[in-house]
Every structure is written in structure tokens, then in C-alpha cells.
Image: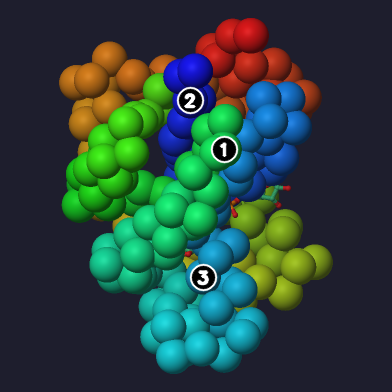
Amino acid sequence: MNKLNIVLFGPPGAGKGTQSKFLMERYGLGHLSTGDLLRAEIKAETPLGLQAQELMSAGELVPDEVVVGMIRNRLEDSPGAKGFIFDGFPRTRAQAEALDATLDAIGSGITLMLALEVEEEELVKRLLGRGATSGRPDDQSEEVVRKRIREYETKTAPLKDYYKAQGKLRRIQGMGSIAEITARLTDAIGD
Ligand code: B4P
């Protein structure tokens, strides 16, 4: 049976984490969020977590080899999964190439990239709103939020071309209610 591997893509605050929950349930997929994995390392105060914490609170990306290693371990630990939602990964071309190579080695591959598109002012509003209630340090200051959006534009957004060249890119309007956006995503994936 072919696996369903989805890259859920978009700028910080586009709704990747939010929508992942619905897609996991609907399609019975595993969820791999590099942001969540890094926050777990920070909470456990591991050496990797300490290194990541500094970069994340400044709104910068953590090194490719760190996140690629984390994702590889998870994929190797779940050989029987129906597929995965990759949330917040890949974020650079090196990460995308490493993911393709890892999946290829186990006879699998990315099925689709679903790219959520949201206006910058809405992203800032959502993230500062979450910062007010969640205590996430990288959601506290407008300067850090805008820095994350700039990092996305320069290092991550070009990945749309990488997946477009493979015929896998689907652009999804990410403005609107959470339910409306879930419906657009499931339309793009199909049954
Ligand atoms: P992530 O944890 O991936 O966080 P994020 O990009 O800020 O987006 P997130 O998924 O959490 O937010 P969502 O859009 O769901 O990354 C954090 C940091 O970790 C990065 O900055 C980087 O330093 C590091 N990192 C992670 N992965 C990495 C990688 N691969 N390489 C290098 N570094 C990496 O939602 C945001 C808010 O919007 C929520 O409060 C939600 O309730 C709200 N919302 C969602 N949909 C909405 C809607 N339709 N309407 C209104 N509000 C909505």
C-alpha cells in the first residue's frame, strides 16, 4: 500500500500545528513537528535543547543536521505507519533533500506539499495572540515574530519551487476559519 506523506507548509502562524491535528485523525497519520520535538528537548534541558533554545528565542532556525537527525530517528522508529504529516519540516533545501533521501531509502516518498498562504499582518496577530496565553517565548515580541517571518521568506519559502518541480505543490488559502481551512486541505488530499 502506498503511504500518504504530507508536507504541511507555511509561514509561522499559518496554522500548521492547528490543522495537523485534524488531518492526523482524518487520515490516521503520524505527526512529526520539529518545533514540538525541539520544545521537548528544551523542556528536558538536554544539550541539544539548550543550543536550540537560544536560536529559537531569537527567531532563527536551528542547524539542519539537528532537525534532520531528529526526523530520521522518528521515521526509523515507526516502520509500519500509514504515513506522516511533516509539520514545520523541511524548512531549508538541505532538509528537503535529506527527507527525500531518507524516505527513498525505505521505498517511500512525499505525496503532496500543502502550502498554507496567509497575509503577514494576520500571522503577526495570531502569534502575538498565542504568546499572550501560551507563554511560548518566541511568540512574545513582535520583533522576534517578524524575524521568523523573514527567515521563512528567505530560507523556507523557496521550497515551494522544489516541490513544484516534482508536481507536488498545492497552494491553500490559509485565511478564514479553522474549519474552512481544514475543508480546503481535505479537498486537496482527497479520500
Ligand atoms: P514551529 O513550532 O514550527 O512553530 P511556527 O512555525 O511558529 O508555527 P506553528 O505551527 O506553531 O503555528 P500555527 O501555524 O499552528 O517552529 C518554532 C521554531 O522552532 C522555529 O522558529 C525554529 O526556530 C525552530 N524550528 C522548527 N522546525 C525547524 C526546522 N525544520 N529547521 C530549523 N528550525 C526549526 O498556529 C499559530 C497560532 O494561530 C495558534 O495560536 C492558532 O490557534 C492560530 N490559528 C491557526 N489557524 C487559525 C485560523 N484559521 N484563524 C485564526 N487563528 C488561527
Circles 3 and 1: CB distance less than 8 Å? no
Q: Say whether disc 3 or disc 2 marks the residue closer to the N-terminus.
A: 2
CA gap, disc 3 and disc 1: 22 Å
Quadrant location of the C terminus? Answer: top right
Q: Looking at the picture, which amino acid does disc 3 mark?
A: Leu
Within 8 Å of ligand 1, the CB of disc 1? no
Residue at the image position 46 percent from the left and 19 percent from the top:
2
The residue to which callout 2 is attached is 3
Side of 113 relative to 188 (left or right): left
The residue to which callout 3 is attached is 38
Q: Nearer the viewer, residue 149 or 24?
A: 24
Query: How busy is the neighbourhood of tag 3: few (under 14 within 10 Å), some, or many (20 plus)?
Result: many
Q: Nearer the viewer, residue 8 or 173?
A: 8
Q: Looking at the picture, which amino acid does disc 2 mark?
A: Lys
Q: Which mark is residue 81?
A: 1
Residue 149 image point, x, y percent: 41, 53
CA gap, disc 3 and disc 2: 26 Å
Residue 35 image point, x, y percent: 53, 61
Q: Say whether disc 2 or disc 1 marks the residue closer to the N-terminus.
A: 2
From this view, report whether residue 168 is shown above or below residue 115.
above
From this view, report whether residue 47 is shown above or below residue 55.
below
